[in-house]
Amino acid sequence: VWEKFKEGMEEKLKTQPTYKQHLFTVCTALSKAIAPDFYYLSNLQESSTLTLFEKIRYVFESNVMRLLETLIFTTVKTAIGLDRCRFAVSGAGALSEDVVSFFAGINIRILDVYGLSESSGPTTIPSKRGQPAGSCGQALPGTKVKIDAPDENGEGEICLQGRHIFKGYWNNLEATRVSIDAAGYFHTGDKGKLDQDGNLFITGRIKELLKTSGGENIAPVPIENAIKQEVPFLSQVVVIGDKRNYLTCFVTLPAEVDEENKPTGKLAAIAIDALRKIGSRATTLQDAAEDPLVQDCVMEGIKKANRKAGSQAQHVQKVTVLPEEFSEANGLMTATLKLKRSAIEKRYEREIIAFYR
């Protein structure tokens, strides 16, 4: 949802006069530069622990933020219906850093939270001092979060305890016993780690772990996010490699949607604009999938992501640009916009066979 907001705003911005585009760029850059300190100081202000220098800086930054709000931010927020929004929250899936940064530029801080239906909603929330990039904050008062069987990196299954945890699955005692251990901890099936301050980081799903033919367990989500960061015009990335000797992936580009919000075969305006910058004239998803310029650009981004990988086994070797975008309408995403990996692999079985031929 936040990604769609961002795409729509960027498209609208391109239709504005040049001076407005420059004004937006300058204001958002300034906001990103001072916002972290401003919010940190404003939180300290509540406990009256500011030094004289910090008080002066807080007053200065408050006035700058107020000016930016008056100049442009209030108008932008009103246009998207968020002028009265106090807390912006994201959940259900990983949020890319460029989306977080974009909204920080218009003084909307998106807070990542974590929870499940089985935990009656959220379990973590950012502390007053904020949350490190990529984390979901700390456990809410009265709740406990622990990492079960952590590996050498401190990563393991996220387990939750507290009165907010459900009592069990309806008429399914066996599933309940599997999910809730003797100590009352609910085993979420999500993989993550905690930092020294208790901030939770989600690193993948236990069930989604790929085990290569070489025996190495690999979490696909961090690799997929790294590729999207290197190639921002991609909408989705799916890493393949379970029981195989190297990793491959499918990628999709954002498509226009129809009146029922279903993807069409046409590229979204933001994708067309991005492809023009690399020399591609593609206007449909099929055009983009067959364009060598698009394929080369994506592969170049994958190579950059590979250089940041923790091991050779986490390198993606091959890629296919698909002529459709995954969605709930075509059965390849859930209602909460999570990838249906098994459904994707089944639909594109022929392409996967070709990867490893």
Image (tube, rainbow, N blue to C red):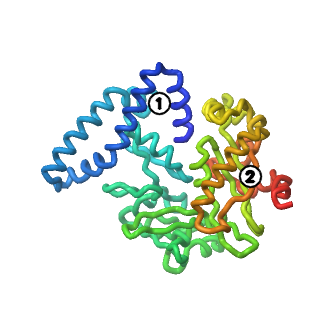
Q: Sequence order check: which comes first, mark 2 or mark 1?
A: 1
97, 189: nearer the viewer: 97
Identify residue for label 2.
319
**Number of the label disc, if any, that sits on residue 80:** 1
Residue 183 horizontal/vertical position (percent): 49, 79
Residue, far bottom: 182
Q: Residue at x 38, y 70 (%)?
A: 196
Pointer 2 with pointer 1, Cβ within 8 A = no
User: Eyeballing the image, is 188 above or below 225?
Assistant: below
Residue at x-position 17% and y-position 47% = 55
Q: Within 10 angstroms of label 2, few (less than 14), some, or many (20 or more) residues?
A: many
Q: How far apart are labels 2 and 1 at the CA level?
A: 36 Å
Label 1 SS: loop
Residue 334 seen by the camera: no
Which percent across, then down, holds residue 72? 37, 27
Instruction: Decide if residue 227 is in sight here.
Output: yes
Give the structural element (helix, strand or loop) at label 2.
Answer: strand
Nearest the viewer among 177 and 343 is: 343
Report the side of 184 relative to 232 (left or right).
Answer: left
Q: Type of residue at label 1?
A: Ile
Q: Position of residue 260 (x, y in %)?
A: 67, 32
Q: Nearer the viewer, residue 286 or 123?
A: 286
The image's mark for residue 234 is none
Closest to the camera, between mark 2 and mark 1, is 2
Q: Is residue 253 above or below residue 239?
A: above
Three-letter amino acid code of the residue under disc 2: Val
Estimate how packed mark 1 is, as few (under 14), some (14 to 19) or many (20 or more) residues with alpha carbons within 10 Å.
few
Q: Quadrant of the N terminus?
A: top right
